[in-house]
Amino acid sequence: MKNTMIRNRLPREWFAEWIDPEPAYDGKERRPASVLRRRFSVDVPSAGDAADAVLYITCHGLYEAVINGRRVGEFVLAPGTGDYHKRLTVQAYDVSGLLVPGENEITVTLGDGWYRGSVGIDGLTDYYGTDLALLCQLEISGNAVLISDADWEASQNGPVRTNDLQQGEVYDARMENVTDWHGVTVRDYGYGNLQQTESVPVIEQECFEGKILRTPDGSTVIDFGQNLAGYTELRVNAKAGQKITLRHGETLDENGNFTQKNFDPGDRNANGIPQKTEYICKDGLNVYKPHFAIYGFRYAKVETDIDLSDARFTAIAVYSEMRQTGTFECGNNDVNRLFMNSLWSMRSNFCDIPTDCPTRERAGWTGDAGVFAPTAVYLADCLPVFRKWLDECRMAQRDDGLVQNIAPVNNSGSMISNLLQGSAGWGDACILVPWALYEAYGDRTILEENYDMMKGWLAFTEKRAKKTRLQNLMNPYKKYLVDEGFHFGEWCQPDIDNGAAMKKVMMTGAPEAATAYFYRSASLMARIAEMLGYDVDAKRYEELAQNVKKAYRYTCTKDGRITSDRQCEYVRPIAFGLVDGDEAQTAADDLDRLVRENGYHLNTGFLSTPDLCGVLADHGHTDTAYRLLLQEDCPGWLYAVKKGATTIWETWDGVRQDGTVHDSLNHYSYGAVTGWLFSGVCGIRMDAGKLTIAPHPHPSLGYAKAAWDSPYGRIESAWHYEDGTCHYSFTVPEGITARTILPDGREELLTAGEHQL
């Protein structure tokens, strides 16, 4: 029976009016969710026979729509997030199967959501306004049979008593029979910011049954076994008025007790404990899950006097509808767990747009997306989510070309928040992400859509480079060196304090990282411009890139030789092509030495860690790359796995050796190493339809196999060791060929089909 969302569709003409369901709201306290309803008649022969019945709907806030007692669509947290002043998406649903002949009833419940709930790194409320409002129009065969107008009625006396995306929801099941209906107010908000939905909906996905345990402090805690973003559904028998409270967290503390300390939002906690569900029961069986809140959690602390002997708690994962496209398996179970952790952190943070974490911030950080996009394209069909987010980046871009660190913007707008913008490696995501999508999907449209934004960012960077600090004035190419402006630099290096590092960057600049990214973006833009037929731009960006390269080499190398003691300052120039030929090999050899001297531990930070293993393996240091991959001590990818992690942590020591916890335990960024499992370990590399398979096998894994359901078809690469010999098997889809490069130097061109080497 039809009840699905239709993408890329709007009504030919709006007849509906915006309706405000609430009395005057001062924005000083949380309000109940508003319920709106309207009865209407349709002339159809029988139930489900309404031809092309489409409900167009959006709101200020979040909506849940129900027709004749059945929910409209699966979209959770609709209409999604974004800069609502500039774009508010309208969903279209085929509701043919929900209508009946004669009288029908539609009810719509409105929650606060991103519109006026807690959002962003500052936990701001009422960011877009204090008014909730509904706009909807039901058409049958193109004729409007129902619109939002003054004939609707509303109530604030429904069961959702308060709601907030981050703080949580209070629900009173005794009030499900809504009372105290009153009229609505028609508002003139216009239709200028309304756009059709081009992305995919956020939906409920995997479910995990919880196990009740008693912690040392006597608390009742539910363990769902998987850290995720979503909410808990409860099923419990109770008496009317009994209450059950669930507080959601990612981990247990060093004593084995429930904690939220690792994501405690500080001042953002002013409106109450974050991630809290409070449910007041009705008589008998109670089944409930939040309507307008999602949490990042593995555990839930239960506070109640209800007998839980027959209670059931289920964690429901909520994220954008994305088909998993990549699988990986090897002979090391910890690496297999690492792969799954990366996949789950992606799922947890792709909620309409890519965000950094599902707990304290939930912000669309550009830097996180930039480092992870080349991995994300292997794991899931994420193009619609990234495309929507790139739209937000374009809308957030300033007139001078600066690409803001977060999109959509949701900061306080203070002088500090305005000044601390435009970091290299973060703003460059406006080029890096479209390029990663183009390489994987081969669709130039993503480059065309974002070309003006890319040009604006490079123009901003070029202008910023013309200012030079005193210590770099002797550089003959100083006007191409980026050592001014705000930068995070090589953020989150494991042995360097972030605060101290940022102070140093502010005092001395970050010429190595910032100029390297200037070169990377300019060189990519030269290729993009040529590809799109902008020949003048292509020539200019190529000249710009070469001058930036000269500026970098003068300040950051000694005639092409790198002399740093930091691993990142070798990884970046090798990966970006700032050192050439023998210089690159020398730099890789020196990097290998630094890693070995550091006990096969990395000390790279946020920006360069994704390229570390690849740079080493591609320059003959495969053994060191694998020892890094398999490092079980901190900092190392398997440290978290050994600590029981089911997602990727924000910092390498999110759970310290003594069990103390800090920072988010669900950040996808360091999971970018999973991309190397595909592109390096199994060697699957796609360049817009040109497939190369160049695996780097190693006996430490025994075997490895990766499969990627690419836009061109299923690609498989596997290897295993037998009697000291490595055996390979590859699958190439129809329509393309694969250039295979084996570690012994053999090269072959493989056509479609299965191949054994």
Image (cartoon, rainbow, N blue to C red):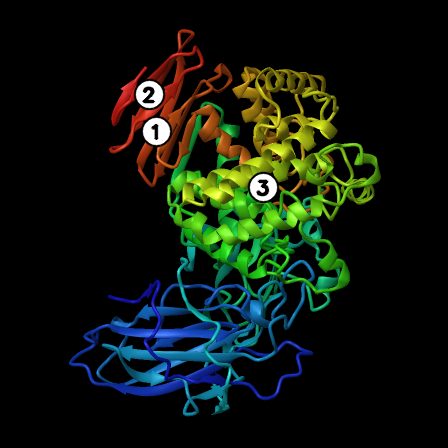
Q: CA distance from mark 3 to mark 2?
A: 31 Å
Q: Position of residue 558 (x, y in %)?
A: 73, 21
Q: Amino acid at mark 3?
A: Ser
Q: Residues within 10 Å of mark 3 (few under 14, many from 20)?
A: many
Measuring 51% from the left and 17% from the top, which residue is drawn there?
700
State left or right for residue 516 relative to residue 507: left
Residue 731 higher or lower than 408, as above or below: above
Local secondary structure at mark 2: strand
Circles 2 and 1 in contact, beta carbons < 8 Å: yes
Quadrant in which the N terminus is drawn: bottom left
Q: Nearer the viewer, residue 702 or 115?
A: 115
Measuring 40% from the left and 57% from the top, which residue is drawn there?
200
Local secondary structure at mark 3: helix
- Tag 3 residue: 669
Quadrant in which the C terminus is drawn: top left
Residue 634 higher or lower than 78, as above or below: above
